[in-house]
Amino acid sequence: MLIDAVTDEVTTATLGLGEARAASRTASRGLIAAEEAYRVRREQRDLGRGTAVELVDSESDVLRARLELVHARVDARVARAHLDHAVGGKSGAR
């Protein structure tokens, strides 16, 4: 019973870490896309083809993407701490 409980905890923590790392990669790609969209909007505005409102919306998207990346990285660290706890020690934070 105890072995099963520990095995379940380690398995859950390992899966959680994998999911958190995947979310971090996804958030990173989202930030890259938002920054590129902002660059394009800024160029359009500079050429007289875009509006200030569109540019501000794009800036908001960049900020939102940055916050999502921060949250994803925090979640990955928390998941790593759970795994460290489950295996009975610190196996090295990444």
Image: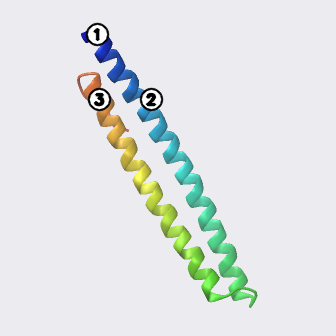
Q: Amino acid at mark 2?
A: Leu
- Mark 2 vs mark 3, CA separation in Å: 13 Å
Residue 84 marker:
3
Query: Which residue is found at the position 46% from the left and 57% from the top?
Result: 68
Q: Is residue 79 left or right of residue 1?
A: right
Badge 3 vs badge 1, beta-carbon distance below 8 Å? no
Spot occupied by residue 16 in the image (x, y as percentages of width and height):
42, 34
Spot occupied by residue 76 in the image (x, y as percentages of width and height):
40, 42
Q: Quadrant of residue 39?
A: bottom right
Q: Amino acid at mark 3?
A: Asp
Mark 2: few/some/many CA within 10 Å (<14, 14-19, 20+): some
Badge 2 vs badge 1, beta-carbon distance below 8 Å? no
Spot occupied by residue 59 in the image (x, y as percentages of width and height):
55, 75
Spot occupied by residue 78 in the image (x, y as percentages of width and height):
32, 41
Q: Tell which circle, 3 or 1, labels the residue nearer the N-terminal end.
A: 1
Query: Which residue is found at the position 35% from the left and 42% from the top?
Result: 77
- Mark 3 vs mark 1, CA separation in Å: 17 Å
Q: Is residue 77 above or below residue 17?
A: below
Q: Relative to the observer, which residue lies in front, 87 or 7?
A: 7
Q: Is residue 3 above or below residue 36?
A: above
Badge 2 vs badge 3, beta-carbon distance below 8 Å? no
Q: Which residue is mark 2?
A: 15
